[in-house]
Amino acid sequence: MERKITWLIMICLMVSILVLASCTASGTANVTSNTPSATATSAATTTQTTPSKTSTTTTTNPTASDDNLANILGLAQKIPAMKYDMVMTTPGVSPITTTTWVKNTKMKMETTAQGLSSIVFIDQVAKTAVTYMPTENIAMKMNFDQAQKSVAQGTNTIEQNNPKNLGTETIDGKTCVVLEYTVSSATTKMWIWKDRGLPVKVETTSATGTTLIEYKNYDFSDIPDSMFTLPEGVQVILTP
């Protein structure tokens, strides 16, 4: 049992880093509205898949205004549900792929790292995260206040950093606004999908190297509520 708890704690720490990185990088990727507009309704029935091969074309657009940027970033808030893969590559570490499902205020993240699989259920309203190990049939429930605050910052997470607009680039057929800003000696470059207000790629460079996050295989189909429910019969361990 002690070994199981140790693994759960390690997974919780890893997922905390992934969630914070995802929220900080994407700004609005995990923020959705409970009252979607007609545009959002249409998006929920449309599937967008990112091809495995990435091709990039650069187009200069120096006249883009902050108002346009705010409008673009706001588009993500109109999406009622989405699924995507987040691939994180850090120096000296094998890439980690997390498949994420988001619907309103709930999120599910499924990750396999170093041969160990885990599923995290996040409830932004309850401010909790439940880390579930399917092979062990146990789960750890923890308070997730910090992740909730990062998600709640939404669009302001990006705009408050006064990003430079570097123009536009096309990645896998998606026209993206390219932004760049520096915080605490770390420079972040972001590619935001103009049609959805969602991140496609994020590069953060600091003294320790460059961390790359790629968002792939976006799917805006509806997601059943059961997707965010812990299976019955799972032993739940509460953290202090």
Image: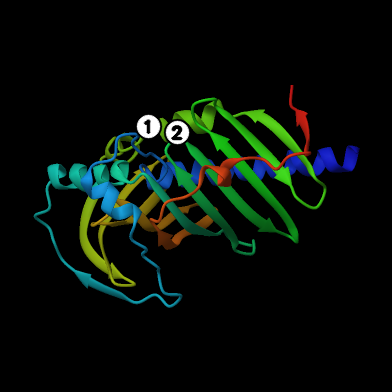
Above/below status of 227 relative to 152: below
The x, y position of residue 170, in whole percent, is 27, 69
Residue pictured at 42% horizontal, 38% vertical: 104
For label 1, the SS is helix
Where on the picture, by quarter, is residue 45?
bottom left
Q: Residue furthest right?
A: 1
Assign the C terminus to one quadrant of the image: top right
Residue pictured at 21% horizontal, 63% vertical: 168
Do the residues under discs 2 and 1 have CB atoms within 8 angstroms?
A: yes
- Going by the numbered disc 2, the residue's amino acid type is Ser
**Residue hosting label 2:** 150
* Number of numbered tags placed on the structure image: 2
Q: Residues within 10 Å of mark 2 (few under 14, many from 20)?
A: some
Q: Nearer the viewer, residue 25 or 135?
A: 135
Residue pictured at 85% horizontal, 42% vertical: 4
**Residue 111 visible (yes or no):** yes
The x, y position of residue 31, in whole percent, is 38, 39
The x, y position of residue 124, in whole percent, is 50, 31
For label 2, the SS is helix
Residue pictured at 78% horizontal, 30% vertical: 237
- Going by the numbered disc 1, the residue's amino acid type is Gln
Assign the N terminus to one quadrant of the image: top right
Where on the picture, by quarter, is residue 115?
bottom right
**Residue hosting label 1:** 153
